[in-house]
Image (tube, rainbow, N blue to C red):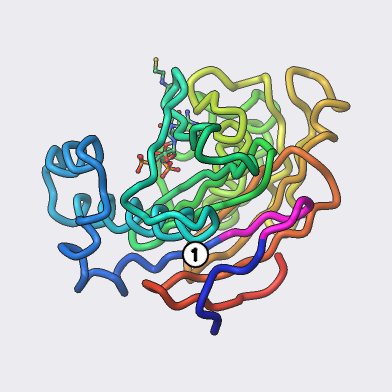
Amino acid sequence: VLARVPRLVDNEVHVWRVAIDRLSAFVSQYEGVLCERELETARRFRFETDRRRYVLSHAALRHLLGEYLRSSPSALRFEHTARGKPELPRDVNPAGLRFNVSHSRELALIAVTLQRDVGVDVEFARPMAEAVQIAERFFSRGESARLRALPAEQQPVAFFNCWTRREAYLKATGEGIAESLDQLEVTFMPGEPARLLSVRGDAREAAQWQLEAFSPGPGYIGALAVRGRGLTVLCWSWAGGRVVAEGEA
Ligand SMILES: CC(C)(COP(=O)(O)OP(=O)(O)OC[C@H]1O[C@@H](n2cnc3c(N)ncnc32)[C@H](O)[C@@H]1OP(=O)(O)O)[C@@H](O)C(=O)NCCC(=O)NCCS
């Protein structure tokens, strides 16, 4: 257990796991570090659970980035790309800290690195009756055919492997899920190491990326995409000021 976040060096990615439900008692306290835009978004949620998860994941992000930047959590400002990817403005971030966040149910993942495009995605892997139809809409043609050919009991894990790996890459580039389809191919069979196979039919571009898969909690599947190869991915968990090392991915 460490008192502070670890030092981040050039060839590293830090992936933070935040168990949202463990912070729930402090939601009103954590709300205090959010900006007006975030509070406004929080107020718009219909369900209290969604509001709580939003507040706590944003507060965790602010606390962590604040530690890396030696800034107070509430002083951080974010800029958003046209497609909504939050970034740190260059003037408060000379080291080029980059990050991405994902949340699913009671878990948030926050990936932090230096000067590299980075994206992260986490999903709770539940059986979904409509998995094949969703795959046909969002996966490449080859991917959805391979998913369909799998025995039914392997489909949920394969589906979420594929979903999180594609999404991690699309969040790294900032594109989002909108226009991917046949432009992107990833590995996703149960047990198969995570790898980006092709980007717009280009295997060389795909080889510029490191893709990692995680099991960040029982039932959850996570993926990280970062531009670069041979990078060290270190996993930590953040529990409101307490930092716990979880090892190398
Ligand atoms: C945001 C998106 C990439 C992922 O959504 P998701 O799987 O439901 O949610 P996740 O929990 O994995 O990620 C959400 C977080 O990703 C970040 N994010 C938002 N937009 C992003 C983008 N374009 N690229 C990367 N990260 C993004 C935010 O930190 C967001 O957290 P918040 O909603 O609490 O503020 C998806 O909704 C998407 O494809 N958006 C694209 C939108 C788009 O194309 N808009 C066009 C507008 S003109």
- The answer to whether residue 3 is left or right of residue 58 is right
Q: In percent of the image, x 43 and y 65: which residue is there? A: 18
Q: In percent of the image, x 19 and y 43: which residue is there? A: 39
Residue 90, percent from left and from top? 55, 32
Residue 125 vertical placement versus 38 (above, below): below
- The answer to whether residue 200 is left or right of residue 97 is right
Residue 205, percent from left and from top? 82, 26
Residue 199 vertical placement versus 227 (above, below): above
Among the 4 quarters of the image, the one containing residue 193: bottom right
Of all residues, the one furthest to the bottom in this rendering is 1
Residue 211 vertical placement versus 28 (above, below): above
- In this view of the protein, can residue 213 be seen by the observer? yes
* Magenta residue span: 8-15
Query: In this figure, which residue is indicated by the disc labeled 1?
Result: 17
Disc 1, SS: strand
- The answer to whether residue 10 is left or right of residue 105 is right
- In this view of the protein, can residue 125 be seen by the observer? no
How many residues crowd mark 1 within 10 Å: few (<14), some (14–19), many (20+)? many
Residue 239, percent from left and from top? 40, 73
The total number of labels drawn is 1
Residue 205 colored in magenta in the image:
no
Split into 4 quadrants, where in the image is the C terminus? Answer: bottom right
Residue 12 colored in magenta in the image:
yes
Q: In percent of the image, x 19 and y 56: which residue is there? A: 49
Residue 72, percent from left and from top? 38, 56
